[in-house]
Image (cartoon, grey):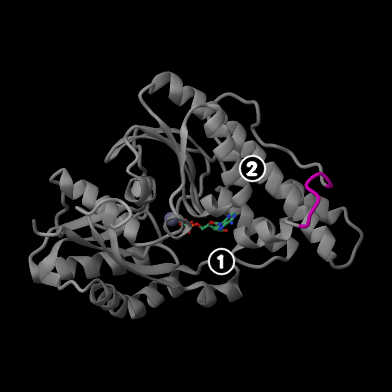
Amino acid sequence: MTPCYILGIESSCDETAAAVVRADAPCGERVVSEVVLSQLEDHRPYGGVVPEIAARAHLSALQALVAEAMQRAGVGYGDLAAVAATGGPGLIGGVIVGVMAAKAIAMVHDKPFLAVNHLEGHALTPRLSHDVPFPYLLLLVSGGHCQLLVVEGVGQFRRLGTTIDDAAGEAFDKVAKMIGLGYPGGPAVQAAAVGGDPRRFDLPRPLKGRPGFDFSFSGLKAAVRRSIEQMPPGPLSAQDKSDLAASFQAALVDSTLDRVRRAVRHFRANWPQGTALVVAGGVAANAPLRAELTTLAAREGLDFVAPPLKWCTDNAAMIAWAAAERLALGQSDPLDFKPRPRWPLDPDAPKARGAGAVKA
Ligand code: KG4
Ligand code: ZN
C-alpha cells in the first residue's frame, strides 16, 4: 500500500511549524517529522504577540522549515497525498503566509489542498495520539479560546459553552503581567504558584454554580488587580508573587472545573455512547488543571485523554492530522480558498458576548 503522507503547515499565531504525518500508520507512529519555530523572543519585549512582526517572521522562516520537515521525513513532494495549512481563525497575515505556501506546493505537485480550521486541529489531536472514538467532550483552553464542545465527528461540533470575556490562557497571561512574572504567563504562573499559599487571597470563582456552560475570567482578573492595589506600596516580594499566583490559579481551576463538571453531566445524559473527556490547547499544559480533570473524569466514569504537551500547544502535526481525517472522507478545498480570520467550529452556536477571537 502506498503510504499516505500529508504535509501540514501552521502559522496562525506566533509559532511557525511544519510537519509530515503518515495517516495510515497506527497511532503513536503517525508523526513522521515535525519542526516548530517559536517567535517568543521576537514578541517578548512587547509582552504579547504583535501581528505584523508575526507575519514577517512566518514569511522569512516558513520555506526553510517546510524543507526541513520534508527532509527529516525522507519524503519527496511527489510522495505526498495532500498539502494542508491552517486556513483560520488566527492573525490573518500569518494565515495568508501558510495558506499561500501550501497552495503553491499543492499546485506545483498536483496534490489536493486542505485549509484546516485551527480549532479543529486542536479538537482532533486526541485522535492523533490516542484513537479516541466520537463523540467526545472537549475542553479547548488556549490563549484565545475557552470552549466546551461535543465533537460528534469530523467537521461536526456542538458548542456547549464559551468564554463571555477573556480566554483562560489570556487570563493567565494578563495576571502574570500584573504580578510581574513575564510572558507567556501560564507556565510562569504555574511555576510561581508552587511555593505559594492558594488561600492567602480570597478571589472570586466566576459563574460557579450558575446554569449553563460558559466561562468568565475578567472579574477574577480584576480581583487580582484590586488585591495588588491593596498591598503596601513598593515592589511585591517573591512570596507575595507566589501567593498571588497560587490564589489566582486555584480560583481559575476551580471555576473551570465547575463548568466542566456540569458539561460532563450534560454530555453523559445526551450522548450516552460517549466515553471520553478530552482537553486540548496551550492551557492543557497546566498541571493542577490536568490533575483535577483526571479526578473528575474518573469520578464521572469517563476516560480522560490529554495529548502530549507538544501537541497541546500550537503545532503543525495537528493540522496535518485534521487534514488526514478530512481527506479520508473525500474532502479537500479549492485553490481559491480565502483565509478566514474568524471561523467558528459550531456556526449554529449563539455568539458569545466578548470572547477573544483572534488568537486560537
Ligand atoms: O494553544 P496555544 O499554544 O496558543 C494559542 O493560544 O493558540 O496556547 C498558549 C496559551 C498561553 O496563553 C499560555 O500562557 C498558556 O497557553 N499556557 C499555560 C501553560 N502553558 C501554556 N497556561 C497555564 N499553565 C501552563 N502550564
Ligand atoms: Zn492554538
| Distance in Å between CA atoms under marks 2 and 1 | 23 Å
Amino acid type indicated by mark 1: Gly
- Identify residue for label 1: 48
Residue at figure coordinates x 64%, y 37% from the top left: 255
Looking at the rendering, which quadrant does residue 202 occupy? Answer: top right
Amino acid type indicated by mark 2: Val
User: Observer-nearest residue: 184 or 174?
Assistant: 184
* Quadrant of the snapshot with the C terminus: bottom left
Q: How many marks?
A: 2
Is residue 218 shown left or right of residue 29? right
- Identify residue for label 2: 253
- Helix, strand or loop for the magenta stretch, by majority: loop
Residue at figure coordinates x 81%, y 44% from the top left: 199
Task: Determine if residue 351 is in view.
Answer: no
Disc 2 C-beta below 8 A from ligand 1: no
Q: Residues within 10 Å of mark 1 (few under 14, many from 20)?
A: some
Q: Position of residue 162 (x, y in %)?
A: 50, 38
Q: Which mark is residue 85?
A: none
Q: Position of residue 206 (x, y in %)?
A: 67, 36
Q: Residue 198 lies in magenta, yes or no?
A: yes
Is residue 145 shown left or right of residue 254? left
